[in-house]
Image (spheres, rainbow, N blue to C red):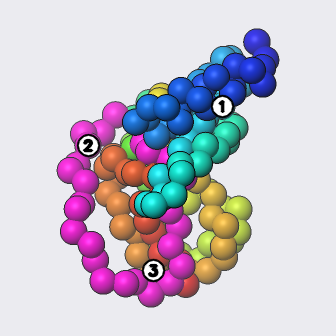
Amino acid sequence: MKFETDYIEKLAKILADTDLTEISLEDGEQAITLRKDVIVSAAPQVVAAPQAVQAPVAASAPAAPAQEAKAPAKKGTPITSPMVGTFYKSPSPDADPFVSVGQTISKGDVVCIVEAMKMMNEIESEISGKVVEICVEDGQPVEFGQVLMYVE
């Protein structure tokens, strides 16, 4: 099944007319995510972002409570979560983490996985540098735009 433009437009209207912030659909190897970025004092934006289908990883760790306290500004460039989901630092519970503090990474390196709706989404670095802080614990829920780690 190919996602038709009319179908996508109907989903976008549902997203715009409700309190939902994201709709994700998967059909075999095809997937689509519609996300609404809410901006204070402006109309919401609806963004279509196709997601690559990933093989599920057999990992189920208990979720830790989200950290609500804002920390002081960190040194470095943040890598943020592109979606709401669960953060995983490694591809499986018994595997080494993708990155660790002090490690040098390159643009395009996979730095973690965010599981959303049973899909494992590899998060790639958009910058090169040294990881100076990892802000999220393994198995912790993350929000869209939440800082996952800092790179300098």
Q: Does the magenta stretch include residue 82?
A: yes
- CA distance for labels 3 and 1: 33 Å
Between 145 and 63, the residue placed more toward the observer is 145
Give the residues drawn in magenta, as a range.
Answer: 60-85
Q: Residue 43, how many percent across, how many down? A: 54, 51
Looking at the image, residue 27 sits to the left or right of residue 85; the answer is: right
Looking at the image, residue 126 sits to the left or right of residue 77; the answer is: right
User: Which quadrant of the figure contains the C terminus?
Assistant: bottom right
Amino acid tagged 3: Val
* Magenta residues, dominant SS class: loop
* Rendered image quadrant of residue 127: bottom right
For disc 1, the marked residue is: 32
Crowd class of label 3 (few under 14; some 14 to 19; many from 20; radius 10 Å) = many
Q: Is mark 2 on a helix, strand or loop?
A: loop
Residue 63: mark in rendering: 2
Amino acid tagged 2: Ala
* Residue 2 visible within the image: yes
Looking at the image, residue 13 sits to the left or right of residue 50; the answer is: left
